[in-house]
Image (tube, rainbow, N blue to C red):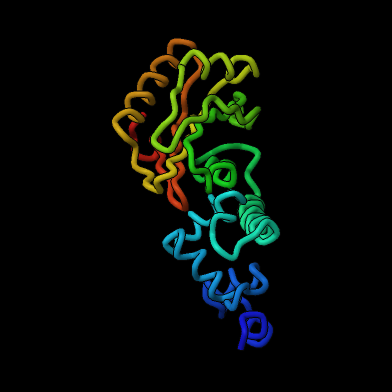
Amino acid sequence: MRPRERALVLGLPALSDAELVAIMVGSGAQGEGALDVARRLLDAVDGDLHALGRCDPLRLRSIRGIGDARAVRIGAAMELGRRRMGREEPVPQRITRAGDIVRRFRPKLLDLDVEEFWVLALSRANTPIADLLVSRGGQSGTVVDPKVVFRKALSVRASAVVLVHNHPSGNPNPSAADRKLTDDLFKAGQTLDLPVLDHIIIAGVGHFSFADHRLL
């Protein structure tokens, strides 16, 4: 049976990754079936669905058999998956643990192929005031200016902040530079009476919390 027929008979969970992508591809081209195109697309990302989610339409179109319409269709499916992830579990109005922050920021950062550094500004009651983008860099890092971090936080009258950034590599463990930056910002926050409550690194489906690891 073709993937669409198998989906109708067996249900979507029974299908392989290639079969699900083949349904998005729709039809084959130049003597190939949709499944052949789907397998070639997955081979191009080493079978990594997170890597597929990071592909923009231009990257998808570079795969033989993927044109504009198919590239947009696949990208739209990936975007719907990200949005669903962000809405499956409501984010609490009051931040009490690292998981609350991860649920808030993972949809923003999950499939990025560059690093972004954000600040979550909090009120005295630990309710979110604003998500503040501080910097955007490359795959291996981004430059963070402490003056920008605290200027942005003070501009929205934050009483405390949480630092958040992503690791496109998928490895959530902090680098030496991450540790030094966290220490510098933590000390600066103490001086300004604007405490840094945590620093969360989001990497794929994993994350690292400095507070949970008692590194603050």
Q: Residue at x 42, y 14 (%)?
A: 188
Q: Quadrant of residue 199?
A: top left
Q: Position of residue 164 (x, y in %)?
A: 49, 34
Q: Quadrant of residue 173?
A: top left
Q: Quadrant of the C terminus?
A: top left
Camera-nearest residue between 123 and 6: 6
Q: How many marks on residues?
A: 0
Give above or below for 211 relative to 99: above
Q: Residue at x 63, y 43 (%)?
A: 92
Q: Position of residue 65 (x, y in %)?
A: 59, 65
Q: Position of residue 21 (x, y in %)?
A: 58, 69
Visible in this render: residue 70?
Answer: yes
Camera-nearest residue between 128 and 44: 44
Visible in this render: residue 88?
Answer: no
Give above or below for 103 relative to 175: below
Camera-nearest residue between 61 and 148: 61
**123 lies left or right of 161:** right
Q: Quadrant of the N terminus?
A: bottom right
Q: Residue at x 48, y 21 (%)?
A: 195
Q: Quadrant of residue 74?
A: bottom right
